[in-house]
């Protein structure tokens, strides 16, 4: 049976394929690309279907702990990976319905009847899953009948209760004994869409008027940051195509100004792709930027992003921890080290990350961050500034790391910086005793850690 692309059944089937791929270790954006190719979805003609499929997959990732635990409870004999994933997608929608989240947010809420009916059609449409359509029907109906008891049972497992791996919860609890539940909950909230306005080209107030004229509601949440009330495709954002505006989280927008760049400086952006912060730096002053990125495919995106902004950088595919391979020997006035990390501060934007990371990754990343910063430090001019950034909320990648740098880099002076920003509308954690400037921080942003070091002149 061929399902129409606009049907929920088709979209659930596609979402289940992507969810299965994540379960087998692929990052969700790649899994969605692969699924779209397998289903022969055209980027333009099928944009709406692709968007709907993506939306379902992201929603499932946010409920994946609960959904998987329910499947384990409700299915005695494993029905196969594709049916498992289809059940996870359907249960996630039913769980959202239960919490009223989708309805509250004014987006794709479906009646329980529709979800069950379409999940059964999805199973029936594929030769490999058709045998399981009775099972899909029975499992989903049983969930609806017995959900109170089932949820009480499932919630005894904390991974299912919070939709985060047990080791992740342990790290949150250890670091934030008072706030860990709020942080765990914030991982499953949809993030706001925030824009960065190039105020050198268009004053913020004028841009807000342009937005309003385009029928989009937004408000200023920082010197260049505008938060949209509702996320929209970038094609609908006024000024996006001509490079007046970019999509960038308000917390990420703090990085470039912390470097205090001035015309004529040589700046190294050491872990640069996809170039969000590179573009911001180039908007702030007329500088000479070297953008280093180890992943060649991701490095290509820096150029794409800068072209839209009408900016240029010297893009180098290389390892930031091996400057001998790419450095020309000329020291830098400024270095941005936006190092690879757990990404625990941006899980609400990338809900698959928690299911892909392993606890052992953290120690490996901590070592890599140390190696990168230690190797970059000699490239900085005396009097120059290095900004260390992670999109993490684990102190091992944040304040503990900054203290390690402070102790190792004997000619470094630690400057004021925002320190630990927690995701959502939380207050910040002091990074050091003399931490300042936090009053001006935007109120809803992703989680980041910022530290700044100046080399003694
Ligand atoms: C947090 S992301 C950077 C985000 C970017 N600064 C932006 O604002 O758009 C970290 C990047 O570092 C890259 N990376 C990881 N290890 C690296 C290394 N040893 N040298 C250079 N780049 C590295 C990753 O591929 C990833 O693109």
Image (spheres, rainbow, N blue to C red):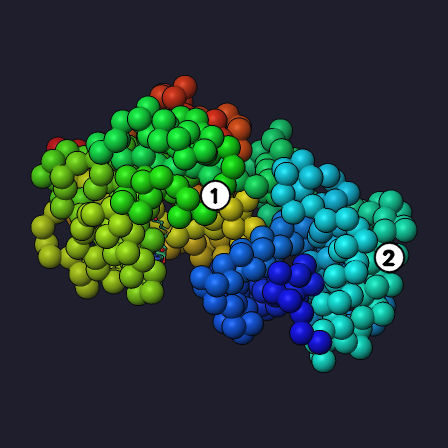
Residue drawn at x 40%, y 26% as measured from the top left: 220
How far, Cα to Cα, is label 1 from label 2?
Answer: 35 Å
Location of residue 207 (image quadrant): top left
Crowd band around label 1 with a 10 angstrom C-alpha radius: few (<14), some (14–19), many (20+): few
Left or right: 400 in relation to 272: right
Q: Position of residue 63 (x, y in %)?
A: 67, 50
Number of marks present in the image shown: 2
Q: Position of residue 116 (x, y in %)?
A: 79, 58
User: Reading the chain from its start, which is encountered first: label 1 or label 2?
Assistant: 2
Please tell me which residue lies in front, 49 or 168. 49
Secondary element under disc 1, as helix, strand or loop, is loop
Evaluate whether residue 369 shows in this view: no
From the image, tell me which residue sits under label 2: 141
Please tell me which residue lies in front, 126 or 285. 126
Please tell me which residue lies in front, 164 or 116. 116
Residue drawn at x 47%, y 39% as measured from the top left: 193
> On screen, 417 above or below 265?
above
Q: Quadrant of the N terminus?
A: bottom right
Location of residue 263 (image quadrant): top left
From the image, tell me which residue sits under label 1: 232
Quadrant where ligand 1 appears = bottom left
Q: Quadrant of the C terminus?
A: top left
> On screen, 341 above or below 438?
below
């Amino acid at each position: 049976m061929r399902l129409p692309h606009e049907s929920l059944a088709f979209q659930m089937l596609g979402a289940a394929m992507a969810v299965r791929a994540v379960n087998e270790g692929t990052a969700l954006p790649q899994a969605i690309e692969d699924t779209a190719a397998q289903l022969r979805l055209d980027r333009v003609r099928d944009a709406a279907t692709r968007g709907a499929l993506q939306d379902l997959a992201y929603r499932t990732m946010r409920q994946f702990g609960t959904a998987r635990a329910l499947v384990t409870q409700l299915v005695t004999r494993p029905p196969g990976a594709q049916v498992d994933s289809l059940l996870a997608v359907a249960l996630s929608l039913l769980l959202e319905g239960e919490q009223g989240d989708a309805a509250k947010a004014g987006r794709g809420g479906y009646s329980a009847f529709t979800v069950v009916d379409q999940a059964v059609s999805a199973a029936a449409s594929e030769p490999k899953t058709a045998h399981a359509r009775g099972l899909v029907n029975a499992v989903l109906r049983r969930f609806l009948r017995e959900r109170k008891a089932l949820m009480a049972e499932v919630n005894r497992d904390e991974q299912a209760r919070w939709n985060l791996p047990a080791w992740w919860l342990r790290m949150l609890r250890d670091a934030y004994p008072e706030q860990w539940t709020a942080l765990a909950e914030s991982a499953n909230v949809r993030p706001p869409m925030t824009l960065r306005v190039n105020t050198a080209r268009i004053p913020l107030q004028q841009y807000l008027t342009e937005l309003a004229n385009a029928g989009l509601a937004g408000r200023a949440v920082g010197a260049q940051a505008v938060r949209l009330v509702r996320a929209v495709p970038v094609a609908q954002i006024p000024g996006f195509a001509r490079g007046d505006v970019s999509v960038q989280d308000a917390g990420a927008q703090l990085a470039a100004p912390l470097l205090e760049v001035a015309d004529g400086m040589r700046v190294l952006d050491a872990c640069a792709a996809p170039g969000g912060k590179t573009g911001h730096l180039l908007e702030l002053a007329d500088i000479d930027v070297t953008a280093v990125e180890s992943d060649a495919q991701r490095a290509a995106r820096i150029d794409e992003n800068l072209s839209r902004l009408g900016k240029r950088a010297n893009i180098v595919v290389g390892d930031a921890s091996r400057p001998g391979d790419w450095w020309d020997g000329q020291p830098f006035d400024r270095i941005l080290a936006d190092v690879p990390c757990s990404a625990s501060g941006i899980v609400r934007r990338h809900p698959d990350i928690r299911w892909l990371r392993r606890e052992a990754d953290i120690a490996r990343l901590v070592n890599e961050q140390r190696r990168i910063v230690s190797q970059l430090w000699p490239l900085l001019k005396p009097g120059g500034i290095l900004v260390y950034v992670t999109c993490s909320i684990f102190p091992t990648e944040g304040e503990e790391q900054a203290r390690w740098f402070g102790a190792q880099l004997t000619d470094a002076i630690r400057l004021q910086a925002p320190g630990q920003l927690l995701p959502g509308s939380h207050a910040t954690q002091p990074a050091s005793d003399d931490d300042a400037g936090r009053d001006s921080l935007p109120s809803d942003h992703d989680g980041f850690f910022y530290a700044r070091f100046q080399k003694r002149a």
